[in-house]
């Protein structure tokens, strides 16, 4: 009777088999399949959200401002409770391009009505922008327009009796101000560089080589600034000017409303033709310093 011979399993082969199995089961070191943007949502108003409120958080590709921003990821939160509202938005890192610009947009709806919305696109992910954010929303009026808070108006608040046309123009101007970091900025200084003297300073923000906002900060001979004038343009046409001495509304390149420093109508104002000619001449002169006609 032949006795079977039992041979020992080679130790080296056994270790190689175990190692191969472990490698096969280990998590992949390749790109992550998903990641999360996290944040907190709040607003200033003392308004409680009803149970049927819904939060909409969208991540969009905001690289090209001339086309609708493609949706990258979205999170809907039903019955979010009260502020502050925490959220986590999952997205696919493989869909993010380093040379693109991405932004968060947030709305709070009650039924089909928008109650609150982010007043501007908050940049995230690329170009050193964050993956963890805090968003303060603004109240949306019955007409669907965002109503800027006192904080967003800075040190130049609207008077309670401000002409509705001027208010609309100022809201549009604030929307431009909220997006200046997305525009190309050029600067020109004019004046001697000496200690204690602040020269005349011009700044121009452009989109696709078209002027959007111009600021002119004058300086006196003693070096004390006299204030800054801001010119806002839409599609190449001037629509609002704010100077230390007044506010001016343009429609179709024609001056249609002149206000004093407190944004009130003044009986002492110069004729519309005179003011229009002065402001347009000042604008052309300043733009010429940047080589813009």
Image: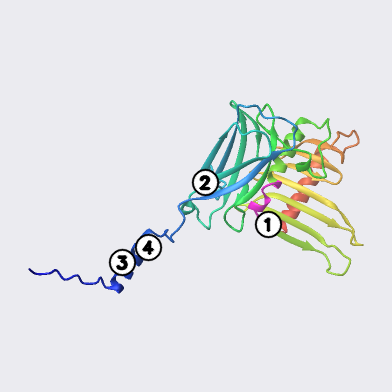
Residue 98 position in % (x across, y down): 52, 58
**Span highlighted in magenta in the image:** 177-185
On the question of residue 252 being in view, the answer is no
* 98 horizontally vs 48: left or right: left
**Sequence order check: which comes first, mark 1 or mark 4?**
4
Q: Secondary structure at mark 2?
A: strand
Foreground mark, 2 or 4, reads: 4
Residue at the (35%, 67%) spot, across then down: 19
Q: Quadrant of residue 142?
A: top right
- Dot 1 corresponds to which residue? 185
Q: Residues within 10 Å of mark 3 (few under 14, many from 20)?
A: few
* 153 horizontally vs 77: left or right: right
- Dot 3 corresponds to which residue? 17
In the image, 213 versus 98, the foreground residue is 98
Q: Is residue 122 magenta?
A: no
Q: Secondary structure at mark 3?
A: helix
**Sequence order check: which comes first, mark 3 or mark 1?**
3
Residue 122 position in % (x across, y down): 63, 47
Residue 116 position in % (x across, y down): 66, 34
Position of 7 relative to 181 (above/below): below
Q: CA distance from mark 1 to mark 2?
A: 34 Å
State the colouring used for the structure image.
Answer: rainbow
């Amino acid at each position: 009777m032949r006795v079977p011979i039992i041979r020992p399993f080679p130790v080296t082969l056994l270790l190689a088999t175990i190692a191969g199995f472990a490698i096969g089961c280990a998590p992949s070191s390749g790109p992550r399949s998903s990641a999360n943007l996290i944040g907190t949502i709040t607003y200033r108003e003392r308004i409680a959200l009803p149970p049927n409120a819904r939060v909409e958080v969208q991540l969009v590709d905001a690289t090209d401002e001339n086309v609708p921003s493609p949706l990258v990821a979205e999170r809907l939160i039903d019955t979010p409770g009260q502020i502050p509202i925490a959220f986590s938005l999952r997205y696919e890192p493989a869909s993010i391009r380093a040379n693109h610009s991405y932004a968060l947009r947030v709305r709070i709806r009650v039924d089909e009505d928008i109650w609150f919305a982010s007043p501007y696109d908050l940049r995230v992910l690329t170009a050193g922008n964050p993956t963890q954010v805090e968003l303060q929303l603004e109240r949306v009026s019955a007409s669907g327009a965002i109503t800027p808070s006192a904080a967003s108006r800075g040190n130049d608040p609207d008077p309670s009796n401000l002409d509705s046309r001027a208010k609309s123009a100022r809201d549009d101007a604030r929307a431009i101000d909220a997006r200046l970091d997305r525009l190309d900025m050029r600067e020109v200084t004019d004046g001697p560089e000496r200690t204690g003297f602040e020269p005349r300073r011009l700044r121009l923000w452009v989109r696709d080589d078209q002027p959007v906002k111009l600021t002119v900060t004058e300086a006196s001979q003693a070096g004390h600034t006299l204030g800054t004038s801001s010119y806002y343009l839409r599609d190449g046409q001037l629509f609002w000017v704010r100077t230390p001495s007044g506010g001016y509304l343009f429609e179709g390149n024609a001056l249609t409303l002149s206000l004093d420093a407190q944004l009130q109508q003044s009986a002492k104002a110069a004729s519309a033709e005179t003011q229009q000619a002065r402001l347009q001449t000042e604008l052309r002169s300043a733009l010429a310093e940047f080589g813009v006609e």
